[in-house]
Structures are given as structure tokens and as C-alpha cells.
Image (cartoon, rainbow, N blue to C red):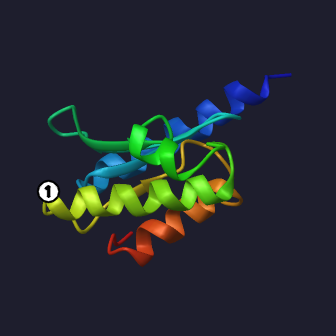
Amino acid sequence: MQSLKLNRLRRAKQTRVRIAKQGTPRLSVFRTNQHIYAQIIDDRNHKTLTGASTLESEVRNEVSLGGNKVAAAIIGKRIAEKAKKLGISQVAFDRSGYKFHGRVKVLAEAARDNGLKF
């Protein structure tokens, strides 16, 4: 029996293959028990365009805990604002093999509400 982490990574790999065919930057989400991270990545040039996480000092001042839905909503809003500054409006959502619920869903909805399309 495979571990839960290997199953998640297998799902993530399949998703990234499909996203690469689209040719748009991808919004990648990574979560731990204590923090949540989001990055916009350009796979064609192999570069991270921008990122946001609960480790940033501005976010730490707003939220005491980085591993909850409130923090995920703030990160979704921040990543959307940073993408707008770079002129990015369309991305592909890469949930990294996580189920689309809880913190991942809240982050995605916050990014959509602040102007990102996916």
C-alpha cells in the first residue's frame, strides 16, 4: 500500500501534465499544518513569477495562526493582488494533489474574488 503522501504526489503529477498543455501560468498551492503557500509559476521559462505565504511579515501581523481558513483567504487575496501587478489575469489552478475543500478551496475562492480567472 502506498503512503498518503505518494498518492498525493502522483495526483499532483498527473494534474501538472494537463496544466502544462494549457500554456498558462499555474497557481500552485502547498499547505502544511502550520502554514499555507501559493505561487504563480511559468512552466515554459521555469520561473516562479510571484508568491505569497503565511510566513510573510505583513500576513503574520494580520493572522496569529497560519494553518486555518482565515489565513488561506488572506493568501488568496494577496496572490491575486500580486498577479494583477504583474499583469496576470488567467492562471491554471494547481491544487498539488490536495482535495478541493477546506483551506485549498478558501484560497481559490479568495483568488477568484480578487480578479484571478481559472
- Tell me the crowding category of disc 1: few under 14, some 14 to 19, or many 20 or more residues within 10 angstroms, Cα based: few
State the image coordinates of residue 25 (x, y, percent, origin top left): 26, 52
Whether residue 63 is situated above or below residue 115 in the rendered picture: above
Secondary structure at numbered mark 1: loop
- Residue found 18% across the figure and 39% down from its top: 44
Left or right of 11 on screen, residue 76: left
Report the number of discs.
1
Residue 90 or 81: which is nearer the viewer? 81
Q: Spot the residue most to the right.
A: 1
- Amino acid of disc 1: Leu
State the image coordinates of residue 3 (x, y, percent, origin top left): 79, 23
Quadrant containing the C terminus is: bottom left
Whether residue 34 is situated above or below residue 15 in the rendered picture: above
- Residue found 46% across the figure and 47% down from its top: 59
State the image coordinates of residue 84 (x, y, percent, origin top left): 21, 65
State the image coordinates of residue 115 (x, y, percent, origin top left): 32, 75
- Residue found 44% across the figure and 57% down from its top: 93
- Residue found 41% across the figure and 38% down from its top: 57
Left or right of 103 on screen, residue 2: right
- The residue singled out by tag 1 in the image is 86
Quadrant containing the N terminus is: top right
Query: Residue 39, located in which quarter of the rendered image?
Result: top left
Query: Residue 32, located in which quarter of the rendered image?
Result: top right
Q: Spot the residue most to the front.
A: 61
Residue 54 or 15: which is nearer the viewer? 54
Residue 10 or 35: which is nearer the viewer? 35
